[in-house]
Amino acid sequence: MRPRRRLVQADAVSVSQGWSVRVASAADIAVWAQLRNALWPVDEVAEHEDEAREQLAAPGLHTVLAFADDGRACGFAEASLRRDYVNGTESSPVGFLEGWYVAPEWRGRGVGRALIAQVEQWTRAQGCSELASDALLENTGSHDAHTACGFEETERVVYFRKALREA
């Protein structure tokens, strides 16, 4: 049985044995983009870098990154404030977990939970009483990770699309 790690929070930084979590900055764009690319490989790394720059400049967005003690980035969480209806919630605005990723070799060590804790702290500071998220139906690993961090499933949705041809 592994010993429990104690998180210490100070100035939006969490520190644990072997890794730390802090708010993203412009100096982190390259490593942040690599992590985003691991989660969303359909886009090029350069596109992720552009989106990271835009996020840093936009109000109502928050990103935290996890780093190993040797300086390697090992996870991230991106959150936003959503004022439109968010499925399964009862208030507005709502904090929304837009992206959450922990490198496979760092999973099971509390990194994901620490990222979520920082997002929760930011969400509360924005005056929100709820944090929402989503995951693809087949991504059961994400479902399990969300549940382990205290999220509850609220509903399942299947989206439809129909291409329209010109009349």
Image (spheres, rainbow, N blue to C red):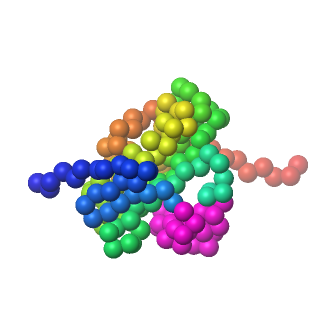
Residue that appears at 27% across and 64% down: 18
Image quarter hosting the N terminus: bottom left
Q: Please tell me which residue is depicted at 54% across the width and 63% down the height of the picture.
A: 25
- In the image, residue 45 lies at what x, y percent? 57, 72
Q: Examine the structure image and report whether residue 114 is included in the region drawn in magenta.
A: no
Q: Residue at x 65, y 35 (%)?
A: 84
Tell me where the magenta segment starts and ends, as one range: 25-54
Taking the image as shown, residue 105 lies to the left or right of residue 33, namely left
On screen, residue 167 above or below 18 = above
Q: For the stretch drawn in magenta, what is the main secondary structure?
A: helix
Residue 19 lies, with reference to residue 149, above or below; the image says below
Residue 51 is situated, as x and y percent measured from the top left of the image, at 63, 62
The answer to whether residue 102 is seen in the rendering is no
The reply to whether residue 125 is in sight is yes
Which residue in the rendered view is the most extreme toward the right? 167
Residue 94 horizontal/vertical position (percent): 56, 35
Residue 49 magenta-drawn?
yes
Identify the residue at image location x=48%, y=56%. Answer: 23
